[in-house]
Image (cartoon, helix red, strand yellow):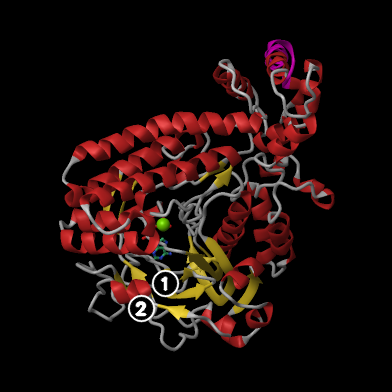
Amino acid sequence: MQLHIKNNFSKSLPSDPNLNNTRRQVKEACFSYVIPKQTDNPKIIHVSEDMLSTLGLSSKDAATKDFKNVFTGNLVLENTKPYAMCYGGHQFGNWAGQLGDGRAINLFEVEHRNKIWQVQLKGAGETPYSRTADGLAVLRSSIREYLCSEAMHHLGVPTTRALSLALTGDEVLRDMLYDGNQAYEKGAIVTRVAPSFLRFGNFEIFAARQDHKTLRTLVDYTIENHFPNIGAPSKENYIAFFAEVSQRTLDMIIHWQRVGFVHGVMNTDNMSILGLTIDYGPYGWLEGFDFGWTPNTTDSQHKRYRFGNQPNIGLWNLYKLANALYPLIEDTEPLEHILENYKTDFQRKSFEMMTTKLGLFESDSNDKLLIQNLEDVLLLTETDMTIFFRSLSNFKKGDSKQGLDIVKEAFYVPNQISGSIAQQWRDWFQMYAERLGGETLSEEKRKAKMNAVNPKYVLRNYMAQLAIDDANKGDYKRIDELFQLLKKPYDEQPEHEKWFAKRPDWARHKVGCSMLSCSS
Ligand code: AMP
Ligand code: MG
């Protein structure tokens, strides 16, 4: 196994001089060196071919003992020094102090095809940042992260990636629902890959400690390595940096809204500075279109991180990042201006995203109303978001009567579509049919464009759970089946048509399908 190893992050930034793996507050340092835990009986159960080649590896490499040992933390490669990063964060609206990589350990960076990738293990044991927890991860949450992060990439959503999924052979004690029922589960490790795993919280921690020196060092490093187009460090360029992070964050969230993804824990420690979807915990996919939905039971009371609130939370988090960068800029006006722009850009980009979902490419002053009316009628009864938008591309110009028939598979309780509700749908389809009259694209081209933004297959909550149930019994075929399916989410895959279906009734209130906690 030949990897072109780099250690830019750890070579460029201040490290914690304490080399002991004890829990502590780490000051004036961006990371602490730490060795992953040896595991009892490691076993790789899935590998992403795509990420293998991204890192310059082959399937042959993936079958070696070294691969297994490196990507389960049992072998530390020569010239590499694993480390955990120090960060803080605002959790559920409150400053939580130091958090850090409590169970993520960065192995090294790999350079391949002029790109540099960070490679890290999630679930490889305790670090100085593990606080009261064990640094481990269980199989169910690892499958969820592994499948979803790769699926998101293929959906065109910016995200961290995953190279491999492995069992450690160790057992991990978890209270899955935080209800006092602890049980042993299989331990697992996901190897994650991204250009950087830096989060808003990496910057916040230094600002909170008034350590402006390390803050500046980290910002300069980030711009130089990850935003090289911005140029040399200066007050103006720090502002430009914030503007770009703001834009990337918004673009990522617009993608989430487009595909119906709900992150579930948008704390500032889970916000990537590169605008990547990061930390797949109690996330979920919309089944019924519902702005108020969150999969995270830990957030069920206030629903802070509900689907419809994600854009606002992105902005809230950016305020926190702006505060953290302020000491380097000392001028609120340009930061406020960028945050104001986020709001107007959100309105514009969200509108553009919805028009492409609806296949509207000409401009029409009534489109805002058309979209508003659609959202209103979608909320009247439980209507599957994925099936609705995918089916809508079958709508033919000029015939509004076909509408309900075309989308009927999307309704969870079909006989609710009667009386005034059916009438509201007919009215909407009438408006839509008239609007399509103003489109110049051919029927065929409109359909192709709609199908390129409205996925046919997403990782429905129950699908991940089926793969988990099988894997817990030692059967990993379903993981591969879903992995392959989700590589082409926009394609018709007739052999996989069974996954283009509403959530089955058994999954409505099942743990892992609609109810998830942060326990992982
Ligand atoms: P999360 O909610 O998973 O993003 O985690 C919030 C913080 O808790 C981060 O600092 C994590 O590294 C840490 N953390 C979560 N789970 C564990 C665990 N099992 N062991 C140690 N630290 C953890
Ligand atoms: Mg996290």
Residue 115 showing in the rendered view:
yes
Pointer 2 local density, CA inside 10 Å: few below 14, some 14–19, many at least 20: many
Residue type pointed to by label 2:
Val
Residue shown at the point (68%, 17%) measured from the top left: 435
Residue at disc 1, CB closer than 8 Å to ligand 1: no
Which quadrant would residue 14 be assigned to in this image?
Answer: bottom left
Q: Is residue 396 magenta?
A: no
Q: Earlier in the sequence, mark 1 or mark 2?
A: 2
Specify the label residue 34 is tagged with. 2
* Above or below, 306 relative to 212: above
Q: Position of residue 315 (x, y in %)?
A: 36, 38
Q: CA distance from mark 1 to mark 2?
A: 8 Å
Which quadrant would residue 154 be assigned to in this image?
Answer: bottom right
Residue 291 showing in the rendered view:
no
Q: Position of residue 473 (x, y in %)?
A: 69, 67
**Magenta part of the protein: which range?**
416-428
Residue where numbered disc 1 is placed: 105
Specify the label residue 90 is tagged with. none
334 left or right, relative to 383: left
* Above or below, 207 relative to 393: below
